Image: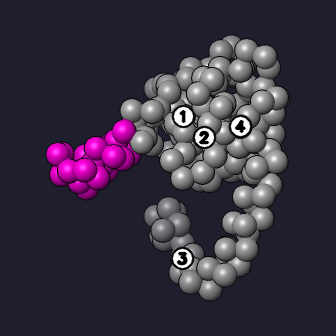
Amino acid sequence: MSLFLSTTTNRVDRKGRISIPANFRASLPAQGYQGVVLYPSFKRPCIHGADMGFFEQLSDSIHGDFGLFSDAHEALANATLAESFQLSFDPEGRVTLPRELLNHAGITDQASFVGLGRTFQIWNPEAYQAHRLKQRQLAEQEAANLKPVIRRSDGSGQ
């Protein structure tokens, strides 16, 4: 299971290529798809990303939690799976961000990778700073509602 942590800002070249942060690449499973899956957020001006395993679980959840012919199933599948891009790493650990993703997030010459645990986001750096401040304020308000972290005997921490 991948675990994406920290925030890193990298340069985007004229062809839309960007290096995925080394710590993000190191977190990806050694076997399987050598790349990431990205889709435009339907809630924010950013790009969501994860490894292929996460998207397999997301697909299973969408198909299992909603009736196959329900409006919710179709909406979530279209907003995530249908708009996703499977991007393989080049030898330098870069991917080429599709123009529609760059436009959606307002990314030009730099992009901030924001680790969120099982997933990550890619933002225009200035937009992310404003978002980060709002999220920090919300976190301060919600912190009292968090359950204590209890380490399980199996080492999973849950």
Q: CA distance from mark 2 to mark 4?
A: 10 Å
When the figure is inspected, residue 30 is found, relative to residue 144, above or below; the finding is: above
When the figure is inspected, residue 130 is found, relative to residue 146, above or below; the finding is: above
Q: CA distance from mark 2 to mark 1?
A: 7 Å
Q: Are marks 2 and 1 in contact (CB under 8 Å)?
A: yes
Q: Which residue is mark 3?
A: 150
Horizontal and vertical percent position of residue 16? 71, 20
Kindly identify which numbered label has been placed on residue 47: 2
At 76% from the left and 49% from the top, the residue drawn is 127
When the figure is inspected, residue 129 is found, relative to residue 99, above or below; the finding is: below
Q: CA distance from mark 3 to mark 4?
A: 40 Å
Secondary structure beneath dot 4 equals loop
Residue 67: in magenta span? yes
Q: In the rendered structure, which amino acid carries the disc numbered 1? A: Leu
Give the mark nearer the N terminus: 3 vs 4: 4
Side of 123 relative to 65 (left or right): right
Give the mark nearer the N terminus: 3 vs 2: 2
Q: Which residue is mark 1?
A: 38
Please report the bounds of the magenta region as a residue range.
57-78
Q: Are marks 1 and 4 in contact (CB under 8 Å)?
A: no
Tally of numbered tags: 4
Q: Which residue is mark 4?
A: 106
